[in-house]
Each structure stands twice: as C-alpha cells, then as structure tokens.
Amino acid sequence: MKKTFKKSNEDTIAAVATRPGESAINIIRISGSRSIIIADRIFKAKNKKPVKKMQTFSISYGFVVDKKGDILDQAILTLMKGPKSYTREDVVEINCHGGIFAANKILELCIENGARLAEPGEFTKRAFLNGRIDLSQAEAVIEIINAKTEESMRIAAKNIMGQTGEKIKEIRSRITDVLVELEASIDFIEEDLEITPYEKLREKINKITEETSILIEDQKRGEIIKNGLKIVIAGKPNVGKSSLLNALAKKEKAIVTHIPGTTRDAIEEILYIEGIPVILTDTAGIRKSRNIIEKIGVQKSIGHIEESDLVIMVLDCTLKIDKTDLEIYEKIKDKNNIICLNKVDLGCKIKKSEIKSFASSKNIIMVSAKEGKGIKKLEDMITKAAFTDRSFSTEERIYVNNRHKNILKDVLKLLKSAEDAMKVKMSEEFPVSDLKIAYNLLGEIIGQKTGEEILEKIFSKFCIGK
Ligand SMILES: Nc1nc2c(ncn2[C@@H]2O[C@H](COP(=O)(O)OP(=O)(O)OP(=O)(O)O)[C@@H](O)[C@H]2O)c(=O)[nH]1
Ligand SMILES: [Mg+2]
C-alpha cells in the first residue's frame, strides 16, 4: 500500500454514508481507481463471481471477509463503474446490516486495503472536479439535505438539475456577445472603419442588468421560503399586539390582559401563511418605563424589529395617534411594514389620511384581533408585502443562494460601470475590462476559476459520505 500523507484527488476514498447508530442497514461507499480491487479483497460473492467481472450497475449478494477469510457480515454490493457514476470514478457501495460495529469494521477493512477516509462532501466534490456537475449543483445537494420545507426541497431539486448553472451560462454568453463587438471595434480602430455601436450595446447591457437584478431580488424570496419570514408585531402597550399574534396563530399563545405592559419578553410562534413558514414575534409594548424588566423588554423589541423582514405596527384605533406612536414609526420606517389599526369593533377614531400624513406605508389595514375581523386580508397583505407584489410561484423562478447573490451584486456594479463608460463614450478598453471581470466572477458561481479556499468552505458543510 502506498503511504501518502498528503490527501490527493487520486486517492480512493471510503466512508460510511448512512447515519451511525441503530438502523436496518448501513451503506459503505468507496470511490476511486482502486475501489474494485479493494472490494474484491473484502467481499466474496455467494456465486463466486469477483467484483471485477461484474457488470456496471449490477448488484451481488455475498459476505464481507477479513484478512483471515473470516466472515464479518452478510452484504449486498453494488458496482457503478466510472464515468457513469456519482463521482465519475468507479464506485462500489456495500449495504451491510445496521448498527455501528459492522459498518465501521467494513470501513476499517477498506482503509487497510488501500482506501483513505473520505472528507465531508468529498464524493460530491469529485463529481464537481470531474465535471459531472457544476458548483451550483453541488451546493444544491447540501440544500436538499438541509431542506426543512417541501417548497425549499423543490427549489434545491431544481438546482440539482442545473437550473442556476444554465441561467448563469446564458448571462455569460450575453456578456460575451457584447465583448466580441467591443473587441472587434478595438481591432478596427486603427483603420477607422467602424464606430462602436455604443447605444445598441448599452441596451444589451441593460437587459443583462435587468436579469441579474431579478436573480438578486428572487434570492430574498428563496431565503424566505427556505428559512421563514421573520415578522415582528410592534406598537405601544395595550394596543392588541398579543391578541393579534393569537388571531394569526389561531390559538391562545400569548397572555392578553387589559393591563398595559402585559407582555415583557418576546413571544415567538411559527405558522404557515400560504405554505410559507412565518416566524411571528410578539413584543413588549414600547413606552418609556422605569420598571427594569419592562425596560429590558422594550430594548428587546427594538432588537427584534431590526432583525425582521417585516414589521406589523399595531395602533389602537380608539385612541388618537400620539408622540409615542410617531416615535415607534421612526424605528420601523425603513423596514418593510404594515400598519394595523386594531379594535375596529369599538369604532375607529383614526382616519387613514392621518396615518398617511406621517407614514409612507401603503399597507394600512383595519382589523379586530378580538373578533378575527380582517385577519384573512392581513395574511394576504403579508404575503404581498414579503414578496414585493410579484406573484408568488416557485415554478418559473430561479433561486440562487447567498454566495451567488454576493457575486451577482459585484457583477451588477461592473455592468453599471461598463454602461457608464459607454454612456460617456470612453474608449472600448474600459467597458471591456469591466465585462471581462464580470464574466469571470460569474464563472465562480458555477465553479470555474473558483479558488480552493471557497471550495473547501462549500464542501466542508457536507456530511461525511456525501
Ligand atoms: N374590543 C377589542 N379589544 C381588543 C382587541 N384587541 C385587543 N383587545 C383588548 O385590548 C387589551 C390589550 O390586548 P393585548 O393583546 O394584551 O395588547 P398588547 O398590545 O399585547 O399589550 P402589552 O402586552 O401590554 O403591550 C385586552 O383587554 C384585549 O382584550 C380588539 O380587536 N377589540
Ligand atoms: Mg402583549
């Protein structure tokens, strides 16, 4: 056996791919040029056929044996020869009986016979390095493993099929089109043959900018679908915040009393509105208080507002708007917000126009948390506000991840810079340089010219055996 300390992509790797612990079966995965040789050393088929004689994508029943030839376990072996395998290398999977002992023992045998322990995500990394999938597809594999809702699983499944990669390639090829025209002009400059059609090219850049912006905008929705929409209910004491949480949650989660300052600590409830997970937080009513507990509660309320995706500010519509309301609005005005006039069952003293005099919010709604009036409308308003009015459907949308979004934001800046340069008719070298950088950056999304450090970071999030 070759003893090397440096891990190489040429090594044959092995890992237990199932979760250790009690289970019906466990799977040991081996990938690399030596996997068939190793399998033949540790597995004896009942029909005596060696693994190297097996057809690809066939299975064999037999026994795992140790060095002395003693049987360790009954097993089923699957052979998937490269390049038509997960990693594009020869892959052998051994299904053995459940429990920790058998699987670990078989893994040990693989190592003794020349395999090296796989690192987290190394099988998927090889699939990427060997060109079977692009980097965005590899990332989607983790997303499917981590998916907590059906909707987020569907998004990840589409990305595994390469949807993001396709879109990025399309944007890159549009950039190439513009680059070709610009570079052709540079070539002809000496001969004074052609004037660069900047107007036409700017239009093209604008179209690319638009598409890039949509991807960034939709990432926010994707994030919400994956991790839930964080909504905070805020307002003065006693306006009916806890009652509103209960009305939306359809249960008596928070304590409601007529005493202002009832809620001291933030109360969280997870619910689903049209299939979207919502993390709804009821907070302590905001007012100046001498009470130390209440003061801390108010501080917390402000913290929650800052972290939220959407704030529902509740007003008691039987009372006139006062200074505290205006101060609270100051804290939420830069947030996506809904202004909720509560207690309409008692008659409303506030006119919408009064609210519009200090708030720019277009989302103003009247409800009665106590009687459940207007709650359905409020739910509709929440989904519209969260998804900035664009119809909500995962079908035709592409959801990039956070890493992709940050790259796309840089691309957007470069596109703008290229467009600006063309606007003021700077020489072709300037937009060319911006567009080339943008083109290369986009490559990082699909894994072209992606540094080892970034790859490490991505694949380390995987579990061992994947
Ligand atoms: N008539 C009527 N009363 C309501 C409505 N919503 C809440 N209330 C009453 O208003 C009082 C305060 O309600 P809460 O939900 O505890 O108000 P809060 O904003 O959570 O108050 P704090 O926790 O003290 O900040 C209670 O007596 C509720 O029954 C409503 O829609 N109509
Ligand atoms: Mg309360």
Image (cartoon, rainbow, N blue to C red):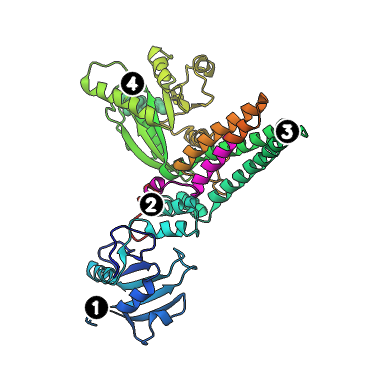
Pointer 2 or 4: first along the chain: 4
Q: Which label belongs to residue 459?
A: 2
- Secondary element under disc 2, as helix, strand or loop, is helix
Q: Residue at x 43, y 82 (%)?
A: 53
Distance in Å between CA atoms under marks 1 and 2: 32 Å
| Label 1 sits on residue | 66
Q: Residue at x 24, y 82 (%)?
A: 69
Q: Amino acid at mark 1?
A: Asp
Question: Taking 241 as reference, is 69 above or below it?
Answer: below
Q: Residue at x 36, y 87 (%)?
A: 48
Q: x and y percent of residue 45 in the render? A: 35, 83
| Label 3 sits on residue | 190
Q: x and y percent of residue 262 in the render? A: 28, 26
| Label 4 sits on residue | 286
Distance in Å between CA atoms under marks 4 and 3: 70 Å
Pointer 1 or 2: first along the chain: 1
Pointer 4 or 3: first along the chain: 3
Q: x and y percent of residue 242 in the render? A: 35, 30
- Do tag 2 and tag 3 residues touch (Cβ < 8 Å)? no
- Do tag 1 and tag 2 residues touch (Cβ < 8 Å)? no
Residue range (magenta):
434-456
